């Protein structure tokens, strides 16, 4: 029962209106027509593929993120949050 409740809340998790749940992010990629093999990648690689498909710089979680000046980027708050290197 606990596992079901935890899953239900994580599927609707958003930060600043942007999905942070990997399945929701993959759904955005599907809607953009991304290759199904690309969608099997990590959260970082899927978001970068979405950025690229939209004609944006594919910069999510890159080495320059803490000096990022793209204030309008929908992934900005998720990108700038501190994450352990092994989780990226």
Image (cartoon, rainbow, N blue to C red):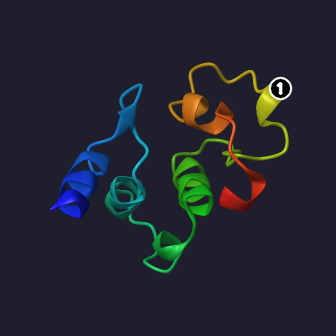
Q: In the image, residue 68 lies at what x, y percent?
A: 76, 27
Number of numbered labels in the structure image: 1
- Please give the name of the residue rendered at 32% of the width and 58% of the height, measured from the top-left corner: 31
What SS does tag 1 mark? helix
Q: Is residue 87 above or below residue 37?
A: above
Q: Quadrant of residue 85?
A: bottom right
What residue do we see at 63% from left, 19% from top? 71
Q: In the visual, does 10 lie left or right of 76?
A: left
- Residue at the extreme bottom of the image, as rendered: 37
- Viewer-side residue, 69 vs 77: 77
Does residue 39 sit above or below 8 in this rendering?
A: below
Position of the C terminus by quadrant: bottom right
- Of all residues, the one furthest to the left in this rendering is 1
Residue placed most toward the observer, 34 or 60? 60
x, y percent for residue 3: 25, 62
Q: Nearer the viewer, residue 81 or 60?
A: 81
**Where residue 63 appears, x then y in whole percent?**
84, 44
**Within the image, what quadrant is residue 29 found in?**
bottom left
Residue visible at 67% across and 24% down in the picture: 70
Give the residue pinned by disc 1.
Answer: 67
> Looking at the image, is 18 positioned above or below residue 33?
above
Residue 5 point in image, percent of width and height: 19, 53
Q: Answer left or right for 67 relative to 2.
A: right
Q: Residues within 10 Å of mark 1 (few under 14, many from 20)?
A: few
- Work out which quarter of the rendered image holds the N terminus and state it: bottom left
Query: In the image, is residue 63 above or below residue 75?
Result: below
Residue pictured at 57% horizontal, 66% vertical: 42
Q: Residue lying furthest front in this view?
A: 2
84 horizontally vs 35: left or right: right
Q: Nearer the viewer, residue 87 or 47?
A: 87
């Amino acid at each position: 029962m606990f596992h079901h409740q935890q899953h239900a809340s994580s599927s609707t998790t958003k930060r600043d209106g942007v999905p942070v749940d990997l399945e929701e992010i993959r759904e955005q990629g599907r809607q953009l027509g991304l290759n199904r093999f690309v969608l099997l990648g990590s959260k970082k690689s899927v978001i970068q593929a979405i950025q690229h498909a939209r004609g944006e710089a594919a910069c999510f979680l890159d080495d320059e993120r803490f000096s990022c000046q793209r204030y309008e980027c929908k992934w900005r708050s998720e990108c700038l949050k501190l994450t352990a290197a092994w989780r990226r």
